Structures are given as C-alpha cells and as structure tokens.
C-alpha cells in the first residue's frame, strides 16, 4: 500500500512520482481553500465566472484528445494544483455494481485498485497523470461525471454534455493558455 502522505510531499517538492499513483485523496477543507473556481451547479458557474465550451474539431478522436488535453493541463499546473471530484465512494452498493458493469477491463482494474487504497470515503482528489485516462473515459462516456479543477492556472472543467465540456476561468490570459493546448490537440474552446 502507498503511503499517500510521503508521496504527496515528494510531488510537492518536484521529485518524480511513481507510476502506481492513482488518485490522491484531498481533505475537503483543503480543497475548498485552494480551489477558487467552484460552484454547486452549472447556472451558478455561468453567473459567477467567464465560461466557454471545450469541444472537438473531430469527434472521432474526442476521448483521446481530452485525455491528452488533461495531461497537458496537469503538466502546466503540477499534480499538487490539479484536482478532481470523483463521487464513487458516496455511491450506494448497487450503483457501484452498475458502474463497474459499464467499465472496460482496464478501468475495472483501476477501480479495484482505487477501492483497496481509497475506501475511506471522500470525493476530492489530486488528479495524477495515471488517473487521467480513467477519469476522462468515465466522463466522456457519461458513466460518472467528474469536475476537474486547476489552480496554478485557474480553470475548471465541468462534466461532459454531448462531447462538450463547459469550462470556467477568471482571466483571459489563463484562458488563452488552455486554448493553445486545445488547438494543438484538435480541440477548441468556443
């Protein structure tokens, strides 16, 4: 089992993190202190922050493009400034079973490992490069929605609606950084 506290310190200090990192649990109060672009519903987000939509120029590679976009965004922000809300631990037992039935083999292995390492509950996690494919697949396939938050370059990505992700930001300069990443991956922010 991974000692999450030691590993998180290593991430913060800039040392390489191991490939067996999954999602790193974050205390709700710490999450709320660090994440400024958060809200309870999409209408509140639209009313409080500048917003656009992240979508594909070519839906054929949409899922892969989203995975690549999120990986680049984590590299831009660092794992310690990249968060996801993942509601699996608060699902009822029957809902967890239905969720697992919708997963491919690779994602089932991920969730089994997640259960063994994160069974204590909580919904907030640092988004690691290793967890991105899983989070992106379950969100783009509309299996379980997650919101992704970046704090070094503040930008929030809300769920997926027909292969479109509402995005929220405060500064146009930050928006432009993400837009450049999107363009390089055949995505667009409109």
Image: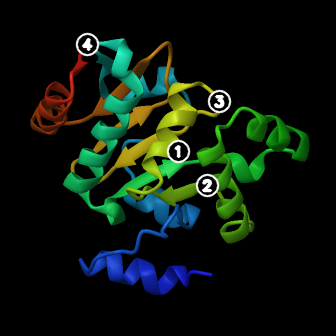
Which residue is depicted at the point 15% across and 25% down? 183
Element marked by disc 1? helix
Q: Which residue is mark 2?
A: 110
Q: Quadrant of residue 171?
A: top left
Report x, y in % for residue 188. Answer: 22, 19
Report x, y in % for residue 70. Answer: 33, 42
Residue 39 visible to an observer of this rendering: no
Q: Is there a contact, CB below 8 Å, between mark 2 and mark 1?
A: yes
Gap between marks 1 and 3 measured at Cα: 11 Å
Q: Nearer the viewer, residue 34 or 119?
A: 119
**Mark identifier at residue 155:** none
Q: Is there a contact, CB below 8 Å, between mark 2 and mark 3?
A: no
Q: Which residue is mark 1?
A: 134
Q: Which residue is mark 3?
A: 143
Q: Is there a contact, CB below 8 Å, between mark 1 and mark 4?
A: no
Element marked by disc 3? loop
Element marked by disc 2? helix
**Mark identifier at residue 57:** 4
Residue 146 visible to an observer of this rendering: yes
């Amino acid at each position: 089992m991974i000692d999450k506290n030691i590993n998180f310190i290593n991430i913060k200090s800039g040392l390489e993190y191991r490939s067996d990192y999954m999602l790193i649990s974050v205390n709700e109060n710490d999450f709320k202190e660090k994440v400024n672009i958060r809200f309870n519903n999409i209408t509140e987000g639209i009313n409080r922050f500048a917003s656009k939509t992240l979508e594909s120029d070519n839906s054929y590679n949409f899922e892969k493009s989203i995975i690549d976009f999120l990986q680049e965004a984590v590299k831009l922000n660092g794992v310690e400034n990249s968060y996801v809300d993942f509601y699996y631990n608060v699902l009822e037992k029957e809902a967890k079973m239905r969720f697992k039935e919708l997963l491919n083999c690779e994602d089932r292995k991920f969730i089994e490992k997640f259960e063994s390492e994160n069974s204590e509950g909580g919904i907030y996690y640092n988004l690691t490069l290793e967890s991105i494919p899983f989070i992106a697949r379950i969100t783009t396939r509309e299996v379980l929605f997650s919101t992704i938050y970046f704090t070094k370059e503040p930008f929030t990505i809300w769920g997926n609606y027909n292969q479109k992700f509402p995005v929220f930001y405060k500064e146009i300069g930050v928006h432009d950084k993400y837009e450049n990443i999107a363009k390089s991956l055949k995505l667009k922010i409109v």
